Image: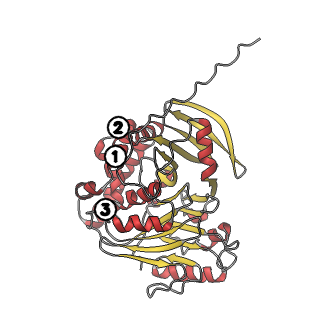
């Protein structure tokens, strides 16, 4: 069913002890009027808030030291590999993608992207290329609930097998977005990358993708921005499905979605077809799907995934899921893994090591609600509430500038 896998892709400095996350501290590394950079469990955590241009500029300033190492430097390695494999000039293809997909891309994402690039000191073209290039490359996903999980709640895993050989894992960033007037959400992402392939929002809607074929079908919203649009506008799986149906789509992709209401589905999507696979529903291209389960993976790996799920049926916890998705379910190129528990807004995630796939690396554990509270206590008050329903793709209200960070009091004079 799945043909191949890919992406499912300083204003001031201080160090301040913050809220505990699963027994771990989160520390502020740098502040910006519209965001902050923090660290927990050895992982970067980027917070950005406000209007699109404000979020993009904060992203660029806070990660100015590493964004140029992603684009254009790492992108050059991707370009070389693409040219060797395809015999085509990588950047000509990207220019075509941008030209064809841009009319279908919400303006707010383009504004944020360009602001990020300018603040980081890279060209507009490099900023756009880094955020449109996933459309050129065409992983595993599984979610369980009820009779399949240990406590009846959803455990949702996303395996990203993609490009660990170009060391993209050196630039991983757990990103927390707080857009004005829209849902706050979290992405297991990378410096300079504003879309998402692995995400959960504050309402417990979680989503991961798996790439298929269809290269060249670029007259639609790029998949990474489509997923972000869903995170910012939808609260439930069914609202997400409605957005997928109404949005012009590109290429061929597969998705696994879940929410805190214990709804979960698999999706097969092309520019012309949208097929919804319900929990426990069998499909001729998949091995036996256990009860209360949605799973999507490549043919050989899907068989192992099915066997492991059946073996652990009724006892699946996040920790058990970590074992289920180890190789050969994950591939040698396993770049990152994430496990979501929508009911509690918890996320476990691991990144590839220097010579190890993500499935063999330690997992960090965070809680989205705790991260949002940490940001609000350390930088700014809560943004205005999101509009009711699934909202409008482009109808952003006039942004209200976020207040500057509170002054740091001077130390008391020595006595």
Question: What x and y, as percent, mark residue 53?
Answer: 38, 39
Q: Is residue 388 left or right of residue 321?
A: left
Mark positioned earlier in the residue sequence (3 or 1): 3
Q: How many marks?
A: 3
| Label annotation for residue 82 | 3
Give the labeled residue for mark 1.
Answer: 127
In space, the residues marked 2 and 3 are separated at their CA atoms by: 27 Å
**Mark 3 to mark 1: distance in Å?**
19 Å
Q: Residue at x 62, y 83 (%)?
A: 310
User: Residue 41's x, y, as percent?
Assistant: 64, 49
What residue is disc 2 on?
A: 118
Q: CA distance from mark 2 to mark 1?
A: 8 Å
| 402 with respect to 273 (left or right) | right
Q: Are marks 2 and 1 in contact (CB under 8 Å)?
A: yes
Q: On the rendered structure, is 265 left or right of 348?
A: left
Question: The C terminus appears in which quarter of the rendering?
Answer: top right
Q: Residues within 10 Å of mark 2 (few under 14, many from 20)?
A: some
The residue drawn where x is 23% and y is 62% is: 88
Q: Residue 134, how many percent across, how many down? A: 36, 60
């Amino acid at each position: 069913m799945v043909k191949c896998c890919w992406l499912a892709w300083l204003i001031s400095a201080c160090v301040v002890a913050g809220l505990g996350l699963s027994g771990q501290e989160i520390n502020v590394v740098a502040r910006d009027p519209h965001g902050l950079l923090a660290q927990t469990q050895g992982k970067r955590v980027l917070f950005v808030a406000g209007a699109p241009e404000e979020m993009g500029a904060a992203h660029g300033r806070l990660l100015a030291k590493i964004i140029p190492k992603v684009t254009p430097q790492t992108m050059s390695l991707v370009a070389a590999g693409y040219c060797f494999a395809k015999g085509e000039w990588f950047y000509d293809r990207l220019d075509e993608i941008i030209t064809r997909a841009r009319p279908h891309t919400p303006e707010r994402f383009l504004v944020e992207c360009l602001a990020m690039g300018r603040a980081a000191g890279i060209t507009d073209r490099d900023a756009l290329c880094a955020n449109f290039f996933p459309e050129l490359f065409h992983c595993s996903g599984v979610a369980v609930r009820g009779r399949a999980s240990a406590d009846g709640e959803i455990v949702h895993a996303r395996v990203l097998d993609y490009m660990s050989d170009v060391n993209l894992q050196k630039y991983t960033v757990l990103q927390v977005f707080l857009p004005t007037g829209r849902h706050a959400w979290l992405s297991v992402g990378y410096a300079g990358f504003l879309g998402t392939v692995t995400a959960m929002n504050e309402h417990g809607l979680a989503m991961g993708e798996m790439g298929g074929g269809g290269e060249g079908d670029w007259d639609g919203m790029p998949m990474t921005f489509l997923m972000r649009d869903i995170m910012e506008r939808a609260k439930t799986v069914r609202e997400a499905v409605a957005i997928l149906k109404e949005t012009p789509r590109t290429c061929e992709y597969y998705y696994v979605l879940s929410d805190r209401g214990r709804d979960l589905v698999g999706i097969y999507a092309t520019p012309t077809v949208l097929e919804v696979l319900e929990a426990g529903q069998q499909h001729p291209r998949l091995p036996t799907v256990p009860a209360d389960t949605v799973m999507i993976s490549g043919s050989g790996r899907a068989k192992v995934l099915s066997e492991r799920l059946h073996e652990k049926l009724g006892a699946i916890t996040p920790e058990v899921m970590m074992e289920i998705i180890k190789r050969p379910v994950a591939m040698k190129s396993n770049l990152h893994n994430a496990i979501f528990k929508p009911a509690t807004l918890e996320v476990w995630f691991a990144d590839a090591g220097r010579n190890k796939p993500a499935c063999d690396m330690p997992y960090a554990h965070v809680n989205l609600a705790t991260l949002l509270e940490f940001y609000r206590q350390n930088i700014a008050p809560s943004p205005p509430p999101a509009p009711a329903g699934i909202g409008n793709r482009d109808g952003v209200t006039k942004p209200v500038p976020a207040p500057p960070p509170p002054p740091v009091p001077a130390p008391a004079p020595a006595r």
